[in-house]
Image (tube, helix red, strand yellow):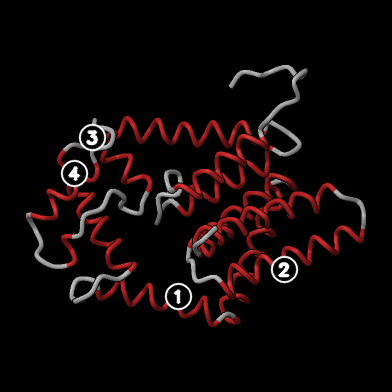
Amino acid sequence: MTNHATQSMAFVAATLCCIFLLHETESPRIKYLLWAAIGLFLFNIFFISTARSGYIALPVAAIFAVGSIYGYRKLPHILALATIVILAFGLASNTLQERIKLALDEQANYQTSNNETSVGVRMIFYKNTLELIQAQPWFGYGTSSFKPIYSAHTASKYQDWRAVSTGDPHNQYLFIWLENGLFGLVLFFAYIYIGIRQGLKNPPYGAIAASFLIAITASSLFNSHFKTYAEGYMLAFFLGALLTRPANSNLSTV
């Protein structure tokens, strides 16, 4: 956990565990401790960490987790509570405000910027990746083809920082689409669907696995967290551990 993005996603995972445990425990003392832990994790995500991944992943995953645990009939109340909490953090956290403002400024000025920026380079990645996808949308360019294909494409277009070579467009879905085409992307969505489905039908801990998979799915709109080493390993650990069945249980079909 050596960077802010990985730390932020770890705090998201811990928060989801606390939400689940709040529902499971009957002890008032344990409930107080869990609420304190949630407060600590939220403080780290929104007030200390500069990673924007947690800002996106946590609300989506928390809404899914609370809905799967308490029932989606309460979804309007869950959404209202989540909106209030996010607004409160947004108004109170200077770190969050500065990071969001910086992202908006970088997005607005990336075409005229003389220097590479975090959001600006992502915009260039997205633009060029989409151009390549349009040329071969159905079957893609093949596994492990992203870096050579992308590098050749940008080298012929730019002479400044926009020509930077990369093997990661910071969007998991664009990465898979370019390499494996639309068919590969559909298979990837099927994997996500099966993981969520198996989580929700595998009590008692599967709901946490499904919720964390949702968190990674959301953060991967702006990262490649399924393939990034630390986040990918953490995802594999959570899904593997929390979907494990006792040795004497009857395995159901997927």
Q: Which residue is mark 4?
A: 148
* C-alpha gap between disc 3 and disc 2: 44 Å
Q: Which residue: 30% across, 34% down?
A: 182
Kind of residue sitting beneath label 2:
Gly
In the image, which is nearer the foreground, mark 1 or mark 4?
Answer: 4
Q: In terms of sequence position, does the residue under pointer 1 or pointer 2 come before the other?
A: 2
In the image, which is nearer the foreground, mark 3 or mark 4?
Answer: 4
- The quadrant of the picture occupied by the C terminus is top right
Q: Which residue: 32% across, 30% down?
A: 183
Tag 1 and tag 2, C-beta contact below 8 Å: no
Kind of residue sitting beneath label 4:
Pro
Whether residue 20 appears in this view of the structure is yes
* C-alpha gap between disc 1 and disc 2: 21 Å
Q: Which residue is mark 3?
A: 140
SS assignment at label 1: helix
Which residue is at the far front? Answer: 2
Q: Which mark is residue 99?
A: 1
In the image, which is nearer the foreground, mark 2 or mark 4?
Answer: 4
Q: In terms of sequence position, does the residue under pointer 1 or pointer 4 come before the other?
A: 1
Above or below 202: residue 213: below
* C-alpha gap between disc 3 and disc 4: 13 Å
Crowd class of label 4 (few under 14; some 14 to 19; many from 20; radius 10 Å) = few
Above or below 137: residue 44: below
Would you identify the image quadrant in which residue 164 lies?
bottom left
- The quadrant of the picture occupied by the N terminus is bottom right
Above or below 160: residue 220: above
* C-alpha gap between disc 3 and disc 1: 34 Å
* C-alpha gap between disc 1 and disc 4: 32 Å
Which of 89 and 52 lies nearest the eye of the viewer? 52
Crowd class of label 2 (few under 14; some 14 to 19; many from 20; radius 10 Å) = few
Q: Which residue: 83% across, 63% down?
A: 33
Residue 82, image x and y in percent?
64, 64
